[in-house]
Amino acid sequence: MTAIKLRTAAEAKKWLRDQGITAKDWAIRNKKNVHTTYLVLNEFNKATRGEGYEIAVLLGMRQPPQST
């Protein structure tokens, strides 16, 4: 199994800027809560479970769950 290079919050923000979209637009497109998205991007949410975790996975900040 190869290791996935995870993004930091700063790298995720830069990636969004490079894509030309705001965090709000990204959240709406991905049907995620805008406030929770900002919390994850600003590291106020540890993103260990729930919607914060799902957002972090989509942004490349956390590894997706392992399937058994």
Image (cartoon, rainbow, N blue to C red):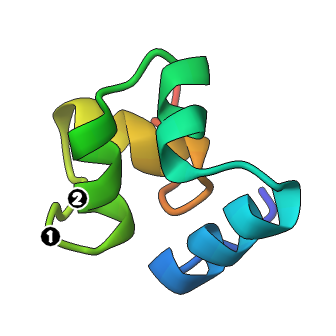
Q: Secondary structure at mark 1?
A: loop
Residue at 44 percent of width and 51 percent of height: 56
Residue at 85 percent of width and 55 percent of height: 19
Q: Secondary structure at mark 2?
A: helix
Q: Residues within 10 Å of mark 1 (few under 14, many from 20)?
A: few
- Measuring from the top left, give residue 66's x and y in whole percent: 50, 35
Residue type at mark 1 is: Phe
Is residue 64 visible in the rendered image? The answer is: no
- Measuring from the top left, give residue 30's x and y in whole percent: 56, 22
Please name the residue that numbered disc 1 is placed on. Answer: 44
Please name the residue that numbered disc 2 is placed on. Answer: 39
Residue type at mark 2 is: Leu
Vertical placement of residue 12 versus 38, above or below: below
Residue at 69 percent of width and 76 percent of height: 14
The reply to whether callout 2 and callout 1 are in contact (CB within 8 Å) is yes
- Quarter holding residue 58: top right
- Measuring from the top left, give residue 10's x and y in whole percent: 54, 84
Q: Earlier in the sequence, mark 2 or mark 1?
A: 2
Residue at 19 percent of width and 31 percent of height: 50
Q: Residue furthest top?
A: 31
